[in-house]
Image (cartoon, rainbow, N blue to C red):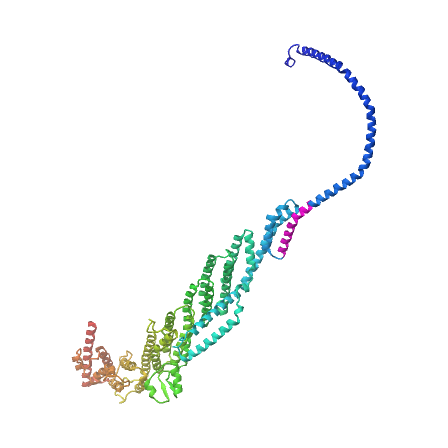
Amino acid sequence: RSVYDDQPNAHQRFMEKLDACIRNHDREIEKMCNFHHQGFVDAITELLKVRADAEKLKVQVTDTNRRLQDAGKEVIAQTEEIIRCRVQQRNITTVVEKLQLCLPVLEMYSKLKEQMNVKRYYSALKTMEQLENLYLPRVSQYRFCQIMIENLPKLREEIKEISMSDLKDFLESIRKHSDRIGETAMKQAQQQKTFSTTLQKQNSVNYGRNMRLGRSRILESKNEITLKRTFEDDDEHEDEVLTAQDLVDFSPVYRCLHIYSVLGDGEIFENYYRKQRRKQARLVLQPQSSMHETVEGYRRYFSQIVGFFVVEDHILHVTQGLVTRTYTDELWNMALSKIIAVLRTHSSYCSDPDLVLELKNLIVVFADTLQGYGFPVNRLFDLLFEIRDQYNETLLKKWSGLFRDIFEADNYSPIPVANEEEYKIVISKFPFQDPELDKQSFPKKLPMSQSVPQIYIQVKEFIYASLKFSESLHRSSTEIDDMLRKSTNLLLTRTLSSCLQNLIKKPHIGLTELVQIIINTTHLEQACKYLEDFISNITNISQVTVHTSRLYGLSTFKDARHAAEGEIYTKLNQKIDEFIQIADYDWTMSESDGRASGYLMDLINFLRSTFQVFTHLPGKVAQTACMSACQHLSTSLLQMLLDTELKQISMGAIQQFNLDVIQCELFASSEPVPGFQGDTLQLAFIDLRQLLDLFMVWDWSTYLADYGQATSKYLRVNPSTALTLLEKMKDSSKKNNIFAQFRKNDRDKQKLIETVVKQLRSLVNGMSQHT
């Protein structure tokens, strides 16, 4: 340590001590060698002796080894062969064991490929599942196994793509076949309904007894034929009932659903399917622009919709979760709103009642079909009530044309019947009863014209047509009865009434035609009760037990009759005006001709012949017409005297005018229309008579003295009227009597006229101030 510590002289002392230690060890070694030297020598001597023996032994061992090597060569060869065989055997055993593990995998993979080739995709997925979970884990260390594992996802995607392609083909197929599916479903529903209805009618013994016998027999025979045919058709086609499965192969959708469910993508598939079906629903619900033109357009539209929902209903019941009731209800509500909007729009274009009726029948079958599949259709029947109003409108338009044609073709003369057969034919068409006419012998005439039974028949046909729409609406007989009565009321109060009003206003309709129209409306009015009975019979509703609506025909025909009466009055007045216009008075004549004017005699003859035609009219109508004519004639004659363009009138003209008024009074007193009491008709000319008497007698003193008294002889003479006429006579006197101022009588008369004129003016002024 001191050496390392570098002490002074430390290294020298260390070396000295080391040398001393070495010398000590050498002495000890020498002592040890001296002690063992003899034993070493003895060992060497012994070893030299053994050396000779060792040489001998070596030769012997070498020889023995040679001989042993020669003998073991064959054994070694056999041993090596045994070793090689045992290695091969071990390898074979290992291969067999490994092949036993791999063969099932290969077999399953081969099976998978075969299933893919034959399109058994659902089985292929099951095989893939077994491979992944059971077989492949056993041989996962092999390369081919890794290749299989890498291929399985690709095969799954391939299966998904193929199944999705099949689903798209399926969706396209059902889109193409939906109309046929719907047509078949609607046909089956209609056959079922027809069969049930026919059975009900067949079992109702009293059905239709209240209808006419002939119609009842026809209906019964039709029912029997229909029932027989229904049974025959049912037996014939019992085994031929087609369903949606018969028309469309649903296996693609089942397969695709199972495949996606196995792959864990069931929700994706459901969403895709529903999305695509919604798109198809929108396409199905989109109608063609010309759908309203033919019934085939509506039929195809309904068939496609029915086919769509029949498929959805089938999917709903054969799959779990793909289509739910909530989904179908939502889809149906959407479709129903669209259908109603489409039908409301397109039906408004229909102007043919037959097409509207066929549309109604299609809607009923459409609704009944879908109702059979559990879809609510109440809104469709509500829509039918809207379409019913439109149907009634089209019927009203059609019947308006029919009524116009009937009125145009009518000759407006009583119906002649030559014998009993013709009479029975008429009363079979129209309920006419007249005991007085029955007593008359043939030939005879019925009071109404040919249009009356024709109108009556057409009203009944309208009721039948309206009834056709009310059938199959799932309404009670009472509601149907009420609908028929409302429709008939519209026909009477609007259509027929309008046709009658237009007919009455036509210029070619004369007084004779108007008289016949009044007679016709009277008989049609009386027939309204038979129409009510007719409606009750076909609906089987008693008017006694049920508060049914009444027909408004009474007011309709009364209004038409009043219009015709007013037109008669108007045309009579117009005719009178025509005669008045041809009057040719010489207002300056000095004296009358001594006979009435020719135009007036012609007018009176016309009135006599006209009022003879009025004998078939109700008494009040004829009397009113006669009174109106006389009053209008009196007014027209008075206006002729007071015409402002007439400046002067001579006394001779007054006398001639008086002769004409006398003829009018004689006509009134001859009772041209029976029923007037006393001189009622003559009072129409009382104003004229008193005015003319005043001027003929020149009784101004009496007139002025008694004016305003109830007992006045000239009570109906108005001062202004007398003043106007007197001034015209004064002007005439001045003009015609140039030398009148030289004759005292004429001067006195002129002064009297002036005096009367002044008094009359004062009376007129007093009346105006009082007013």
Residue 574 sits in which quadrant? bottom left
In the picture, the quarter occupied by the C terminus is bottom left
Q: Position of residue 44 (x, y in %)?
A: 80, 19
In this image, 342 relative to 36: left or right? left
Residue 434 sits in which quadrant? bottom left
Q: How many marks?
A: 0
Quick check: can you spot residue 157? no
Q: Residue at x 72, y 42 (%)?
A: 87
Q: Position of residue 430 (x, y in %)?
A: 38, 81
Q: Nearer the viewer, residue 639 or 334?
A: 334
The secondary structure that dominates the magenta segment is helix
Residue 466 sits in which quadrant? bottom left
In this image, 53 relative to 105: left or right? right
Q: Nearer the viewer, residue 57 or 637?
A: 57
Q: Residue at x 82, y 36 (%)?
A: 70
State yes or no: residue 46 in magenta: no
Q: Nearer the viewer, residue 378 or 91?
A: 91
Q: Nearer the viewer, residue 710 or 397?
A: 397
Quick check: can you spot residue 444? yes
State yes or no: residue 98 in magenta: yes
In this image, 500 relative to 194: left or right? left
Q: Position of residue 744 (x, y in %)?
A: 18, 85
User: With respect to residue 152, does 708 lie above or below?
Assistant: below
- Range shown magenta: 94-117
Q: Position of residue 381 (x, y in %)?
A: 42, 66
In the picture, the quarter occupied by the N terminus is top right
Task: Point out the residue furthest to the left here.
Answer: 705
